[in-house]
Structures are given as C-alpha cells and as structure tokens.
Amino acid sequence: MRTNNKSISIVLILIFLISGATKAQQKQTDAERLAWWHEAKFGMFIHWGVYSMYGGVYKGYQQARGDAAWIENRCKIPVAEYRENAKQFNPVNYNPDAWAKMAKDAGMKYLIITAKHHDGFALFDSKASDWNVVDATIYGKDLLKPLAEACKKYGIKLGFYYSQAVDWTNPGASAARRLMKEGWPNPDSTKIDTYTKEHDGHWDPIQLTSTFDQYIDQVAVPQVKELLTNYGEVSVLWWDYATQMKTVEGSEKLKKLLDIQPNIITNDRLHPDFPGDTRTPEQAIPDRDAVEGQTWETCMTMSSSWGYKKNDSGWKSSEILIRNLVKIAARGGNYLLNIGPKPDGTFPEESIQRLKEIGQWMNVNGEAIYGTQASPLNILPWGECTKKETKDNTILYLSVFDWPKDGKLKINGLRNKIVSARLLANGVKLKISSAQNDLIINVPETAPDQIASVIKLEVKGRVEKINTSSPKKKMQSGALD
C-alpha cells in the first residue's frame, strides 16, 4: 500500500496525542495523590442544607441535644412535613465567590461541602431523586456548580461530603436511632421511642417503603456518579457513618465509582472494611502517639454545632482555633474547620470574624504550617513545634503559646549544631546559648503575637525524636453528630 509523508505525519500526531492523553489519565501513586493534601494542612468544612432553616429549633423548642443538622432525626419530624418546609429554602444571599475567597484569605487550601447530609437533601441537580435543591425548593438552582467555579478561580481544591448510608428522607437508608428526649418534649415520646426501636431507628413509615439495597442502587450510586462526573475535578470524597453501611456489596459499588476520578482522596468512613486514604478523628486532637506515621485529619466545629444553630453560645475563640491548627500540624495532621451557613446563604458573623483573624495569623506564620511534618520534640511546656527537612539541615518552627517571662526559651535535649534562629514575624535574629542539657533561645521581652509567636530555628542534619512521651493510644473516627 502506498503512503505519503502527509498521511504518515497525521498518524504520528494521532499516536502522540493518544499516548499523551493516556499518560494524563494514569492514576498517580498514593504518595503523588496525597502530596497536595499533606502540603495544604488546612481546609474548610461546610455543613449546609434544609436543616439550616430550623437553626436547631422545632415547635418553639431548642433541640435538646446534638448537632443542629440532625434536627429531622432528633425531633422526629415527619418526612412529608420536612419536605413541605424545604419548599421555602431560598438562599438568595448565597455568594460562592465570597465563600471561596474567605477560605483562601483564611489560609485554607481546600473546601469540602455537604453535597448530601443525613437528611438526604442534595445541594445539586440530581436525576436520581427529586429531593434536591432544584426540584424541591423555591430556589431551584444547583448550589455546587457555582461553588466549583469559585474554588477553581481561587485555587481552592474542591471536595464533596456524601452521606452514603444514612438518609432520613429517601426511603430505604439507615436512620441511626436517637431517643425522642434528645429532640423536643413530644407528648408521644414513649410511643415514638418504641416504634424506632422496632424499626431500626426509623420513625416514619415512608422511610420503610424501600430496601437498603434499593436505596444504594437507585439513590446513592447514581448521585455519587453525578458528583464525580458533573463538577470537574473533585479532589476529596468525604464519606460519613461507616457503621451504618449495611452491606459490603453496596460499599463496593460506591468504591468502584472512584475510578471516574482516579486521583481522588477518600476518608475512612465508607465501610469498616474500606480504610480509605485518611483517618478522621472528630472534635478532638488525638494524642501524638496515637497518630504517629498515619495520614489523618481532625474535623472540628467553630461553635457547638456543625449545622447553623440560632443563638449558639459555644463559639471557640480565634486563639483556640489558631492553636488547634498549630497542635494538629505539630502531630502531622490536617485541620478541617467547619462553617454552618445561615439559610439565606451567608456565613454567621462570628465565623467571618474568626476566619479573618486566622488569616491574619497565617499571613505571617503560614510557613510554619504548610508542608510541615510532625514535631520531633514531644514535650514542650511553652507550645508546639513543626519541622521541614532540607537537603542538609532541619528547620524547626517553634510556635510559642506561653512567652517566657525571663526571656529564655528552653529546649531540652536538642544537640544539633545551630545554623540560625529568628522570629518569623519580623526576621529579628535571636541569640543562642546553652545550660546543662538545655538549648536556650534568648527572646525579646514582649511576644510578637499573643496567640502564637513563631521562631524559625535551623539546625544541621536531621533531628532525632526527643523526649518520647506516653504509649500509643487508639485513635477513633466517628460520625458527624
């Protein structure tokens, strides 16, 4: 067969393009997939949905216990009533651009939003169930598409939380039983508690009109496929409530969908048999020995609730939030800090103020957080430490919470030769001395930052673990409640 140079060139170009596309789609190694996540250290969690309309109040009563996002379950709201109320969900002040910018300005590198929480309400245009923001509300628009665009604009990695097992509105799913006393003083509490005990936590007969397998096949699987197909690159899929996942087979079906986004990162809450990539301690910072060498992320609220709660008095101060971030980084983990937007789509003012103050601290001290490793110094009475290793040296970032009144910051047992020491805030060089087994850094009388002042200490070689503390403790991952 005769060929010409032009046809040969076209064939070569096609081969090149095909091989390039194949290479681009190849799955990364675990280390490659997790590299950005380890560098990021700090992310925003967002709990938002129909439950935000209640703000933790039902029939005039404050929900007696637990997260305001659980109000449908805790107060045993009939499904038809909950759906009827959802028609008025109308977040007219939703500004995803502002959300993404606030995350960026706070120093956060990724954002994870409840695409579907336990009430089953989808914040996206789903064809698998009409229980979604487009079909079930007056607002009628997909909330995730503009957020995905805003995250891309500001360089924020996007992740979706998806409650794969618990769903109180789409029939067939798990319910996770809670007693009526945790909701409101319903006069029929005894009767309701008896019913939920006999029906695996369900309180409304409509919840029992499908099987769990039907729920997985008809709702969960197609919705996860929609999330992984319709919103561009999804960096994290954050499952919840592994212990309510009734079948390994259903988990396998969901796990298989991850091939759509082969470089996605997942957590340990799909099913007890599927550990995922990251451990997820909740509302607490684990002991450093419990997480040594593991990939983990503490998720934590700013206030007392994941979902928006009216008159919430449990707000953590910016000082606590910043120091939590430092402590988590010092143990080698990530910090996923939650916001519960109001039903109109705005962040509570308390959240906005704290994000601003965290951002101010990160603008000065972010170097001590991003891309760092766990501290080799395990007992520091004055604060925490993170580290970075260069070719020949080690940089120790000393975050000082309790500034020494005598002007002498002591580190016990560090024997490496000192290269330099300076304040991260203003670059001022600090003098070093020693006494017995202590390295002493001579610091100014006044701390540069009352929350956490960072000293950048560079030493020769690698720093071995010093002052090993207690035996390892088991780390628990829970469900968001």
Image (tube, rainbow, N blue to C red):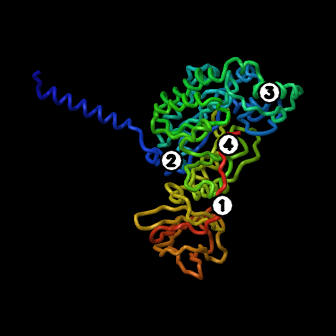
Indicate which disc, 2 or 3, sits on the residue closer to the N terminus: 2
Q: CA distance from mark 2 to mark 3?
A: 41 Å
Residue 278 vs residue 101, the one in the foreground: 278
Residue holding disc 2: 37
Residue 189 drawn at (x, y percent): 86, 28
Which of label 2 and label 3 is nearer to you? 3
Q: Residue at x 61, y 36 (%)?
A: 271
Q: Quadrant of residue 345?
A: top right
Amino acid of disc 3? Thr
Q: Which corner quadrant holds the N terminus? A: top left
State if disc 1 and disc 2 touch (CB < 8 Å).
no
Q: Which residue is drawn at the image coordinates 49% and 55% (left, top)?
A: 371
**Label 2: element kind:** helix
User: Answer yes or no: do the residues labelled 3 and 1 have beta carbons within 8 Å?
Assistant: no
Q: Decide which of tag 3 and tag 1 comes sooner along the chain.
A: 3
Query: Could you say which disc has been placed on residue 471 in the image?
Result: 1
Name which quarter of the figure residue 425 lies in.
bottom right
Q: Is residue 460 left or right of residue 384?
A: left
Of marks 1 and 4, the one in the foreground: 1
Q: Earlier in the sequence, mark 4 or mark 3?
A: 3
Could you say where residue 409 lies in the image, as x and y percent from the top left?
61, 74
Which of pointers 4 and 2 indicates the residue nearer the eye? 4
Q: Residue furthest bottom?
A: 436
Pick whichever of labels 2 and 1 is earlier in the sequence: 2
Tell me the kind of residue under disc 1.
Pro
Q: Is residue 85 positioned above or below 147 on the image?
A: above
Q: Residue at x 83, y 31 (%)?
A: 180
The residue tagged with tag 1: helix, strand or loop? loop
- The residue that disc 4 covers is 478
- What residue is pinned by disc 3? 196
What percent of the width, then of the height, locates residue 64? 82, 38
